[in-house]
Image (spheres, grey):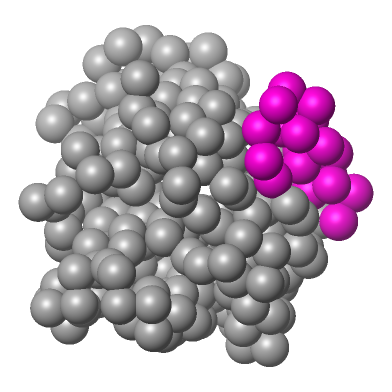
Amino acid sequence: MIDLNGKVAIITGGAMGMGAATAELFASAKAEVVIADFNDELGRKTTQRICDQGGKAAFVYADVSKSRDVEKMVNFAVDTYGRLDAAVNNAARTPDDKPIADLDENEFDALIAVDLKGVALCMKYELQQMMQQGKGGSIINISSVSGIRPQPRTPIYIAAKFGVIGLTKSGAIDYSPHGIRVNAIAPGAIDTPMLRGALKQFGFDPNTYAKQLCMMGRFAQPSEVGQASLWLASDLSSYVTGAVITVDGGYTAM
């Protein structure tokens, strides 16, 4: 059992799906958790569920595409729990579904604003706080297997997730001297509302698609990705930085 007792962690996109599962795992490991999301209702419900189970959690509204919201998010964590030790930058939009020749500029701007710019803004303020504390920290960015092995008809999402890996490696290079580790997780087919919505949007059968996307013939549960974040946030991964860990049932090895 990984113990995060005494650590404070921010989970963006923590209202549902992988974010909510990750927040629950962190709380069960005794971390003090800040759930950040633009979905106020679901964010507060997830926070209350964690508290009802005996965990420590607080909710803050945040649109990660807006610098002022991200800065307030980090300040909220520090004001509430006194510091920041770990962050999982998970907030993301549903992938696009058009090839580049049919690219929609508004869709491009909206998706990049959250999936790439949002990660950069979160890293900016998280790193500032961790450096100010002078005690290191761990930042985990959620990329995707699409950032390693691209899928058809999702050029904006692919560009964003490749970019997240680039930001991760850049952060690892620049902030290792400060004791801050920066890593990425590349999830495969995870059974979340976002995935189910995307499959419906693209007209794919979930059972057939699951067998195409991994060696195990099933979608992963959100908590299986959360376990990777939990390990990266803990001292058990103290010599790991600049890494991209795939949680994909072997998809990128196929």
Q: Position of residue 234 (x, y in %)?
A: 30, 43
Magenta part, dominant SS: helix
- The answer to whether residue 243 shows anywhere in this view is yes
**Is 173 one of the magenta-colored residues?**
no
Question: Which residue is at 58% across, 47% downward?
Answer: 32
In the image shown, does 3 or 154 lie closer to the viewer? Answer: 3
Q: Which residues are magenta?
A: 40-57
On screen, residue 71 versus residue 253, left or right, reads right
Q: Quadrant of the C terminus?
A: top left
Picture coordinates of residue 96, whole percent (x, y): 57, 59
Q: Is residue 203 visible?
A: no
Query: Residue at position x 19%, y 69% from top?
Result: 179
58 horizontally vs 119: left or right: right
Q: Residue furthest bottom?
A: 68
Tell me the quarter of the picture where residue 199 sits: top right
Q: Position of residue 2 (x, y in %)?
A: 35, 28
Q: Could you tell me which residue is drawn at 9 percent across and 51 percent down?
A: 239
Q: How many marks?
A: 0
Q: Position of residue 235 (x, y in %)?
A: 24, 44
Q: Quadrant of the N terminus?
A: top left
* Magenta stretch holds residue 53: yes
Residue farthest toward the right in the current orientation of the protein: 41
In the displayed structure image, the side of residue 66 where residue 26 appears, left or right: left
**Above or below for 142 versus 73:** above
Q: Is residue 135 above or below residue 10?
A: below
Residue placed most toward the observer, 172 or 208: 172
Residue located 42% across and 69% down the image = 160
